[in-house]
Image (spheres, coloured by chain):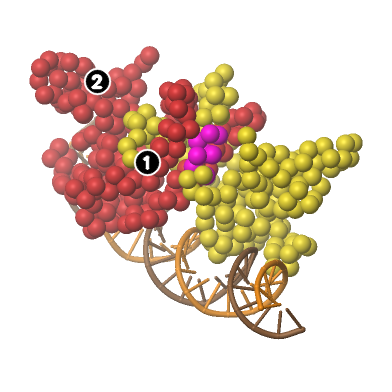
Chain colours: A yellow, B red, C brown, D orange
Amino acid sequence: MSVSPAALEAAQLIDRLERLARAGEQVGDFNPAQWEALRYLSRANRFSRTPAALADYLVSTRGTVSRTLASLEEKGYVTRTASRRDGRSVEFTLSAAGERAMARDPLLALARDIEEAAGPALPDLLDGLRRTLRCAIARNRGRAFGACYTCRHFRAGIRPGSRTPHHCALLDEPLSEADSRAICAEQEPAVT
Amino acid sequence: MSVSPAALEAAQLIDRLERLARAGEQVGDFNPAQWEALRYLSRANRFSRTPAALADYLVSTRGTVSRTLASLEEKGYVTRTASRRDGRSVEFTLSAAGERAMARDPLLALARDIEEAAGPALPDLLDGLRRTLRCAIARNRGRAFGACYTCRHFRAGIRPGSRTPHHCALLDEPLSEADSRAICAEQEPAVT
DNA sequence: ATTCATTGATTGCTACGGGCAATCAAGTTC
DNA sequence: GAACTTGATTGCCCGTAGCAATCAATGAAT
């Protein structure tokens, strides 16, 4: 059960970096949970912008997420539409104000720090973090929320020349280039 | 103001890793803030275990931290002693129960994931994170809370053979080996 | 087709944590 | 000694999170 001092220090550093980033988040109209929701909505594909998916992503509860989204809606940063494929479900999208808010995301400050600090080692750092997240998700039995194109249900280039050249074999839906790079609640990593 | 996609992804990964770690923290007697406090107290040297220092470390307020520590004291995980060097100040220490609780720290799960995922690349990953934290602290104008022996006030091996071979030139206090590796609220990185 | 279980979403309730400001005590400066 | 700073605590208020109950829609089973 023991762990090396180096790994423990790395975990502490991640914890601390996140806290510093979070300290900047109180500014403006948003609290940390609301920033997380905005970030998620800005990256999730159209099948994944529901309260349930967001709750899974945040490892939170639907009730809590429902209130977070209601608050954002009231302030005009997201818009709500009923789902066409499931009468129970609703979908949220960033409004223009929401898109604008993303440019002020406090996480950008952390990203700048990473860029400055890592320099040419950035790809290696990124790789280490990616692998770690994969482990953490596997341990938690959580959904991966990876990019669409890395999914086992992704079929590339089924309709060459079309605006939606790719396809999702799970949902049987056409996918654009942008879709394929968005994160998806249904994503299951392709076996490598 | 713009930032590379790779750096942004790295920031998002850090954010997400921290959230997954935090999701495990609700278990047991502690909430996230209380875990942070316990971690800090387990690592801070004897000059730094005060509410004010902890508030700085957490980028929080003294009022909030005061309540967090009061709660931990009530539950018996920390003990309070009046400071001898400053009549206004109080010092907190982990109780035996607090020490035991650290063995259940949910951050250990993240550390294990890092160890498993990074493997031989761990030193590089650690280095990247360390450098990033340095940048983030510089940007925030926060205190560094680095290890004592990395401080410009640290004087190594002043008393060879003694149990407190080192010395702090700022506080004029003798330091043991263990002291020198603890984090300190007064730490200022030595110029490199 | 009817029933049963599951899933999606919301809301009342309660508790707790966080920030702010005021207060008190103890150092520090001049 | 007066004025200022620093350390800590507490009252107040708000927002958020969790829990559980509720309602609606879907899917599965017989």
Spot occupied by residue B147 in the image (x, y as percentages of width and height)? 30, 27
Circle 1 residue: B108
Spot occupied by residue A76 in the image (x, y as percentages of width and height)? 68, 57
Q: Which residues are magenta?
A: A130-137
- In which quadrant is the N terminus of chain B drawn? top right
- Left or right: where A7 falls relative to A102: left
Please say if B86 is above or below B181: below
Number of marks in picture: 2
Depth order, front residue of A20/B28: B28
Circle 2 residue: B154
- Determine the image quadrant of residue B28: bottom left
- Left or right: where A174 falls relative to B114: right
- Provide the secondary structure element on which disc 1 rests: helix
Depth order, front residue of D12/A120: A120
- In which quadrant is the C terminus of chain B drawn? top left
- Determine the image quadrant of residue A183: top right
Please say if B24 is above or below A156: below
What amino acid is found at the position of numbered circle 2 in the picture? Phe
What amino acid is found at the position of numbered circle 1 in the picture? Leu
Spot occupied by residue B169 in the image (x, y as percentages of width and height)? 21, 21
Please say if B127 is above or below A25: above
- Provide the secondary structure element on which disc 2 rests: strand
Please say if A47 is above or below B119: below
Query: In this view of the protein, can residue A95 be seen by the observer?
Result: no
Q: Residue at x 70, y 62 (%)?
A: A90
Return the chain for callout 1.
B
